[in-house]
């Protein structure tokens, strides 16, 4: 280590994102239930992808020196750093056998005491809240996206892009900015209520094409009519092809389709429809795969998160790589009002598979349904 080496505190929330594929819409306070349903950890893999890319960039750089890592024992940090090839690793916190958000906060306090210049974490909005509760705006933080829901502005758009942001910060090419830390009330979310709260402001290294925006809820006076027109076009297509399975994603634009069909559409989950009837409600990955075996054709209808632009990988982890590989890019239907697209110039995907991301972003543009049988081609990127 040189005297000028940056100090980066690094922590992984080992349970982040586990609830997504099994339809729990989060993992806060329900990790045991997620495991009972067969969920497996996803955060270590996401963290490893970021660290390997960062190690590659540092090794290839003539100017970037390896940072001095401050971290936790085992699965909360040290194991991933060492597996990625980093050797300048100092363990400053040792959690107990069963980790919790208290360990995240305690580790962050240790990072600050050890002089951290940046806190890099792997988790979701809950982890961001816990870290920000300790750091405030005094020390910048950056998230490797691994939660079920990530509405805050402190995350890279993907693990690889997060590594690029860290490399830019280490080289001095990127400055920090102040962003919002948001979180969703998961208990209300599971009941179908969307309740996002602004908790704090945080400092983060910022690159507009690599850092995700905080979610915004975009409305205009004529939005209801436009959503109704979008819904009419989708329902007409359903009527023309009654044997096709339609998977309807979250959000008010897609819910308008359910309203037109007269079904009890889940506002914040994924529902399965065929022949104009609801065949499965609020499905998880384990529900979707058998449905894909039962029907010869499938269409997936999704709407991007406002301002962030994520179509896949935020709030719909039920759509796992095995599910998406079965459905395919050509059967994805993205719907959005013109007002939302005006605030969302680029769509994003973060499927958890780089190869699959490349499939869904091939060509760089995606048609988006913006009215009754009206489409607009919009940029899409991983």
Image (tube, rainbow, N blue to C red):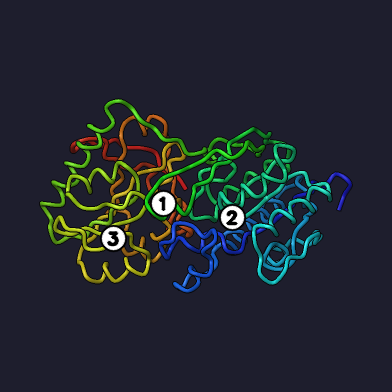
The residue positioned 59% from the left and 55% from the top of the image is 123
Q: CA distance from mark 1 to mark 3?
A: 19 Å
The residue to which callout 1 is attached is: 312
The residue positioned 17% from the left and 58% from the top of the image is 277
Q: Nearer the viewer, mark 3 or mark 2?
A: 3
Would you call the spot at circle 1 few (<14 residues within 10 Å), some (14-19), or many (20 or more)? many
Would you call the spot at circle 2 few (<14 residues within 10 Å), some (14-19), or many (20 or more)? many
The residue positioned 44% from the left and 54% from the top of the image is 357
Q: Nearer the viewer, mark 1 or mark 3?
A: 3
Q: Identify the mark at residue 283; answer none if there is no mark.
A: none
Q: Are marks 3 and 2 in contact (CB under 8 Å)?
A: no
Q: Is residue 381 above or below residue 23?
A: above
The residue to which callout 2 is attached is: 123
The percent coordinates of residue 205 (x first, y second) are 66, 39
Q: Is residue 174 above or below residue 81?
A: above
What secondary structure is found at the residue carrying circle 1?
strand
The residue to which callout 3 is attached is: 281
Q: CA distance from mark 3 to mark 2?
A: 27 Å
The percent coordinates of residue 165 (x first, y second) are 63, 44
């Amino acid at each position: 280590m040189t005297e000028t080496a940056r100090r980066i505190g690094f922590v992984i929330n080992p349970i982040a994102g586990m609830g997504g594929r099994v339809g729990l819409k989060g993992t806060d306070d329900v990790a045991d239930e997620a495991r009972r349903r067969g969920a497996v950890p996803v955060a270590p893999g996401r963290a490893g992808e970021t660290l390997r890319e960062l190690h590659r960039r540092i090794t290839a750089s003539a100017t970037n020196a390896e940072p001095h890592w401050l971290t936790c024992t085992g699965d909360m940090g040290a194991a991933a750093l060492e597996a990625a090839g980093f050797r300048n690793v100092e363990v400053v916190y040792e959690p107990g056998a069963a980790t919790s958000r208290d360990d995240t906060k305690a580790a962050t306090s240790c990072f600050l005491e050890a002089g951290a210049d940046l806190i890099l974490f792997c988790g979701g909005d809950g982890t961001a809240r816990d870290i920000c509760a300790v750091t405030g705006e005094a020390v910048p933080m950056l998230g490797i996206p691994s939660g079920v829901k990530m509405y805050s502005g402190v995350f890279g758009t993907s693990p690889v892009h997060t590594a690029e942001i860290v490399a830019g910060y280490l080289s001095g090419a990127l400055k920090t900015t102040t962003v919002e830390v948001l979180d969703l009330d998961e208990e209300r979310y599971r009941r179908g209520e969307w309740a996002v709260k602004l908790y704090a402001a945080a400092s983060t290294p910022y690159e507009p094409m690599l850092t995700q925006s905080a979610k915004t809820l975009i409305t205009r006076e004529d939005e209801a009519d436009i959503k109704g027109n979008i819904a009419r076009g989708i329902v007409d297509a359903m009527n023309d092809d009654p044997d096709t399975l339609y998977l309807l994603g979250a959000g008010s634009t897609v819910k308008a389709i359910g309203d037109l069909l007269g079904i009890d559409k889940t506002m914040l989950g994924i529902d399965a429809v065929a022949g104009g009837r609801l065949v499965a409600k609020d499905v998880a990955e384990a529900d979707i795969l058998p449905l894909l075996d039962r029907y010869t054709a499938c269409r997936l209808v999704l709407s991007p998160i406002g301002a962030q632009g994520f179509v896949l990988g935020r709030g719909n982890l039920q759509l796992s790589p095995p599910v998406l590989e079965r459905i395919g890019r050509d059967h994805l239907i993205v719907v959005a009002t013109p007002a939302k697209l005006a605030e969302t110039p680029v769509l994003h995907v973060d499927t958890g598979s780089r190869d699959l991301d490349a499939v869904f972003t091939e060509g760089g543009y995606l048609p988006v349904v913006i009215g009754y049988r009206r489409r607009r081609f919009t940029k899409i990127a991983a």
